[in-house]
Image: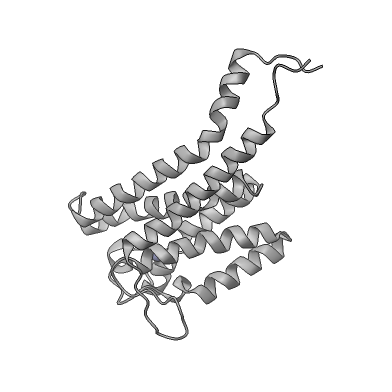
């Protein structure tokens, strides 16, 4: 016999499949808002406005990681580590500048080598090996690649193919389309999965 759930349980069950969709939409809007803020230098000083960039990288990583956590069952702890990695890549600006000054960090001739596919792949493999988790490797790699993709679709040189100095500029609309499609696809798969798992309440 299956007991009939209360109203609250029914409501939360009905809305749960929509959570990934909401995450994708909110993160997408943050991307657009930060891009606009950077374009018009919304905080007046370039150094201050550049502080908005980590929010764009963080929200993009959340958008990209949500299919892994909701649909593929990657743990939230692993996703959090991947999110931190995606934002922390920019620490290499300060290392390359040899200074904690934001002005120095954003005045480099190009982004440092941690912004390369080789470095990010190595870091993802290392984290996966240490944690003995291939899902950690996948999550960190994906989160890092979306950071590189965003930077390569903006201004300034991104050494994607370091140690080579090949340059590949990705149009920003294409970058946004690829990752948002991935997020929406994950959200749709999760909604379908939840619908299939739904318990038939009228059985007894
Ligand atoms: Zn960066």
Q: In the image, is 103 to the left or to the right of 175?
A: left
Residue 35 image point, x, y percent: 28, 54
Q: Is residue 127 above or below residue 19?
A: below
Residue 139 image point, x, y percent: 59, 57
Q: Quadrant of ligand 1?
A: bottom left
Q: In the image, is 100 to the left or to the right of 117?
A: left
Q: Is residue 28 above or below residue 168?
A: above
Work out which quarter of the rendered image holds the C terminus and state it.
Answer: top right
Figure quadrant of residue 82: bottom right
Q: What residue lies at 40% left-to-right and 85% top-to-bottom?
A: 165
Q: What residue lies at 49% left-to-right and 65% top-to-bottom?
A: 145
The answer to whether residue 1 is seen in the rendering is yes
Residue 72 image point, x, y percent: 64, 49
Q: Is residue 129 above or below residue 118?
A: above
The answer to whether residue 48 is seen in the rendering is no
Residue 64 image point, x, y percent: 50, 53
Q: How is the image coloured?
A: one colour
Q: In the image, is 42 to the left or to the right of 152?
A: left
State how many labels appear.
0
Q: Nearer the viewer, residue 73 or 98?
A: 73
Q: Nearer the viewer, residue 177 or 134?
A: 177
Q: What residue lies at 56% left-to-right and 64% top-to-bottom?
A: 141
Work out which quarter of the rendered image holds the N terminus and state it.
Answer: top right
């Amino acid at each position: 016999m299956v007991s009939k759930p209360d109203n609250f349980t029914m409501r939360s069950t009905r809305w749960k499949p929509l959570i990934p969709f909401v995450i994708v939409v909110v993160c997408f809007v943050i991307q657009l808002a930060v891009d606009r803020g950077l374009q018009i230098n919304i905080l007046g000083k370039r150094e201050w406005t550049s502080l908005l960039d980590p929010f764009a990288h963080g929200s993009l990583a959340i958008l990209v990681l949500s299919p892994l956590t909701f649909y593929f069952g990657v743990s939230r702890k692993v996703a959090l580590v991947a999110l931190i990695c995606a934002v922390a890549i920019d620490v290499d600006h300060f290392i390359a500048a040899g200074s904690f000054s934001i002005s120095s960090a954003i005045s480099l001739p190009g982004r440092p080598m941690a912004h390369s596919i080789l470095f990010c792949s190595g870091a993802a493999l290392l984290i996966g090996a240490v944690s003995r988790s291939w899902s950690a490797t996948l999550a960190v790699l994906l989160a890092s690649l979306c950071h590189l993709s965003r930077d390569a679709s903006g201004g300034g040189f991104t050494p994607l193919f370091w140690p080579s100095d090949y340059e590949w500029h990705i149009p920003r609309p294409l970058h946004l389309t690829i990752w948002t499609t991935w997020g929406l696809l994950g959200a749709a798969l999760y909604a379908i999965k939840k619908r299939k798992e739904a318990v038939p309440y009228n059985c007894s």
